[in-house]
Amino acid sequence: MRIKLILLIPKVLFTVFFIALFMVLTKVKFWPIFGTESSFSFGAIFGPVIPRFLNVYWGASAIMLARVLGFAIGYYKMGDIGNLAKFLMSWLTFVPIIAAGTFFAKMFKGDRKLTIIPALSILMFLIHPVGREVWYYSLFWTIPLLIAFLKPRIDSILKNHVAQVYVYSLGSSFTDHAIGAILYLYLANIPAEAWIKAIPFTPIERAVFAVGITFFYFAIKISLMIMERVSALTISTEVSKEKEKVEEKAKVKKESRKD
């Protein structure tokens, strides 16, 4: 029980750190959402890496906890209950990030069940009246579907780990896009014209997001590696000091016996 508690402490501390950083980054806007007055934040490209380091369920819970905590302290504004669509959107706005994080984390394990997410998104888009008008827009979500399905092939072609992670990030980015698009389609009633205008910009937007996800992944991974080495060095130094003390005491006792 004590060992489990000791192992849990670092995870809790990292969870707190990830939540705090995520909440800060959600306030830093950098890319407009076409057809709306909203903008994407850096939280959208940092959030997907959280489940990779905390595991899917813990990471998803951390992201939702950030939303709940944000509402509780007034950091985020909750939608007016009188406007059901905006109220739901205020609560569901982090769902695309959770979906993207799930995709990103499970891609490392080659879980082909991930194809369900983009497949359902395409179906949901096509059964909506506006979605049927611009059905070809949903073809973007065949990208994460193919990435998840062809993961072994992709890894065999791309030997460079950075390139592999970028492809995983691209799939994650389009997964975020798919779930976000469904939410805005059903809750914000974005017209067909807006979807058509967004087509030339979507590939660029998703490629940029994938770069951001890749950057955050390696930044955290390298930081953790440095921390582990520093911790190992500290422990090793302390052990050496303790060993020297024991040897010194043994030497003193030995000399005192000779006297």
Image (cartoon, rainbow, N blue to C red):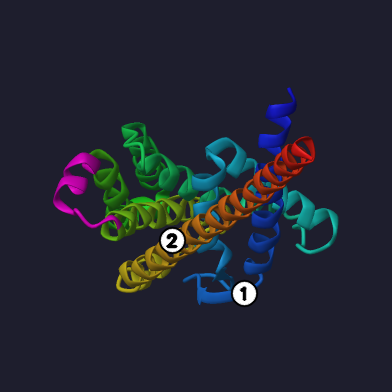
Q: Which residue: 31% across, 60% down?
A: 162
Contact (Cβ within 8 Å) of mark 2 with mark 1:
no
Give x and y (percent) for residue 245: 72, 47
Kindly report which numbered mark, 2 or 1, lies closer to the viewer in this rendering: 2
Residue 81 visible to an observer of this rendering: no
Dot 1 lies on which element?
Answer: loop
Give x and y (percent) for residue 173: 40, 57
| Residue highlighted by disc 2 | 218
**Of all residues shown, which one is farthest toward the right?**
73
Q: Which quadrant is the C terminus positioned in?
A: top right
The kind of secondary structure the magenta stretch mainly shows is helix
Tell me the tag on residue 82. Answer: none
Q: How dense is the environment of label 2, judged by Cα within 10 Å: few (below 14), some, or many (20 and up)? A: some
- Horizontal side of 118 relative to 153 (left or right) equals right
Residue 153 colored in magenta in the image: yes
Pick the front one: 127 or 178: 178
| Residue highlighted by disc 1 | 28
- Horizontal side of 149 relative to 58 (left or right) equals left
- Numbered range of the magenta stretch: 150-161
Dot 2 lies on which element?
Answer: helix
Pick the front one: 188 or 70: 70
Q: How dense is the environment of label 1, judged by Cα within 10 Å: few (below 14), some, or many (20 and up)? A: few
**Of all residues shown, which one is farthest toward the front?**
259
**Of all residues shown, which one is farthest toward the left?**
157
